[in-house]
Image (cartoon, helix red, strand yellow):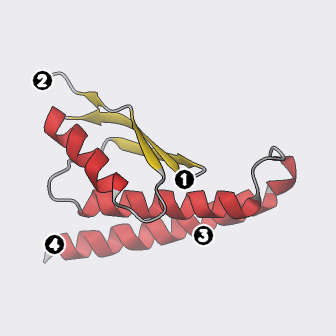
Amino acid sequence: MKTTQILKAAGGIACVVFALNVSAQTNSASSTSSDTTVGQKVDDSAITTKVKAELLGAKNVKSTHIHVKTHSGVVSLTGTVPSAEDKTAAEDVVSKVSGVASVKNHLKIAAK
């Protein structure tokens, strides 16, 4: 029951963050480089949000210290995970998300 509530809360937070991010990017569109469109930034934000939600819901990944950035569909993972299995599982989960073109896995394995 608590897991469901946590996932619902995380999903709600992700939606709010996504909405704020889209608004901020739309306001700063005139100052971005000419090769990145507002539409691409929105798509990248949506992919980032979906990836974060999938990582939160994945039972085989401890994702509390994983940071996600997306540029033109390429997702970069940074941060730390407790094991090599978590690093591999995170990449597997992310690669299956709709819209992800490729994954750059820069996760570090935390020293025990």
Residue 80 drawn at (x, y percent): 29, 33
Q: Are marks 1 and 4 in contact (CB under 8 Å)?
A: no
Q: Residue tagged by mark 2? A: 112
Q: Nearer the viewer, mark 1 or mark 3?
A: 1
Q: Nearer the viewer, mark 1 or mark 4?
A: 1
Mark 1 to mark 3 CA distance (whole Å): 19 Å
Q: Is residue 63 above or below residue 20?
A: above
Q: Residue tagged by mark 1? A: 73
Residue kind at label 4, given as amino acid type? Lys
Q: Are marks 2 and 4 in contact (CB under 8 Å)?
A: no
Q: Tell me if I can see residue 101 in this picture.
A: yes
Residue 23 vs residue 35: left or right?
left
- Sort mark 4 into few (<14), some (14-19) or many (20+) by Cα contacts within 10 Å: few
Residue 96 drawn at (x, y percent): 33, 59
Residue 16 drawn at (x, y percent): 52, 70
Question: The N terminus is located in which quarter?
Answer: bottom left
Residue 4 drawn at (x, y percent): 20, 75
Count of numbered marks:
4
Q: Residue tagged by mark 4? A: 2
Query: Which numbered disc flags the more N-terminal residue, 1 or 3?
Result: 3
Given residues 97 and 2, the one toward you in this image is 97
